[in-house]
Image: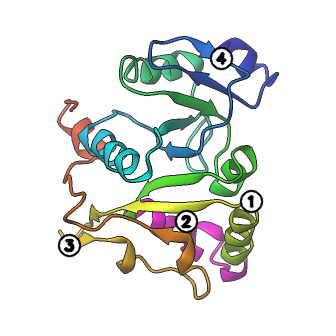
Amino acid sequence: MLAEFYREETPWVLQEPHGRLLVNAPPPRIVFPGSFNPLHQGHTRLAEVVAESRGNAVTFELSIRNVDKPELPADEVRRRLEQFRGRAPVVVTRAATFAEKAVLFPGSVFVVGADTAARIAHPRYYGNDPAKVAVALEAIRAAGCRFLVGGRVDADGRFVEVGQVPVPEGYRDLFTGPGERAFRVDISSTELRAHGASA
């Protein structure tokens, strides 16, 4: 199935929690994108909070493409997928941006951290062109998608919740999320990689 995906015969493939790969599964309604290198407690706890509040399971999403990095090879994708066995479903896509993800999964809620939410709405990631930010957010809105944002500690040690994420005027309604009392896990994949550990 993964080979078919890499030959671009299907836009995405789903790995079920027990490990079976499917190409014709129904599209997920709650999608948690990330690189998951590694998957850690912050990811899994936020997924639990979202599932409890929404009454629907969360499907993780691993894209082989990233606007800042080379395409992930199949062996690396398999390694990262192994982390989800016995835990949760995960889709593999080639959607590097959220506008692309919205096309694949219209009507979905995307679960993101506050740091990712800030990048989604920051002109720096659109060639410093605020108009391009608006175009991307309009496309996401037109697809019926929105974001559920989990708080994160920033570089200054400040816990940033969804209401503190800078969002262009007119698009605040696309971003909601649990407050600090409902969700806070101070851990990151970057820190875990630096210490050669996982959680």
Whether the magenta-drawn stretch holds residue 123 is answered as yes
Q: Which residue shows up at 62% across the image and 51% down it?
A: 108
Which residues fall within the magenta stretch? 115-131
Kindly identify the amino acid type of the residue bearing the numbered disc 2. Answer: Ile
Q: Residue at x 17, y 68 (%)?
A: 157
Judge whether 108 appears above or below 194 on screen: below
Q: CA distance from mark 1 to mark 2?
A: 16 Å
Indicate which label's residue lies in the foreground, 4 or 3.
4
Q: Nearer the viewer, mark 2 or mark 4?
A: 4
Name the residue tied to disc 2.
Answer: 120
Element carrying mark 3: loop
Looking at the picture, which amino acid does disc 4 mark?
A: Leu
Q: Nearer the viewer, mark 1 or mark 2?
A: 1
User: Which residue was labeled with disc 1?
Assistant: 143
In the rendered view, tell whether residue 149 sits above or below residue 168: above
The type of residue carrying mark 1 is: Ala
Residue 80 position (above or below residue 124): above
Question: Which residue was labeled with disc 3?
Answer: 158
Say whether disc 3 or disc 2 marks the residue closer to the N-terminus: 2
In whole angstroms, how far apart are the C-alphas of marks 1 and 3? 33 Å
Residue behind mark 4: 22
The residue positioned 75% from the left and 65% from the top of the image is 139
Q: Are marks 1 and 2 in contact (CB under 8 Å)?
A: no
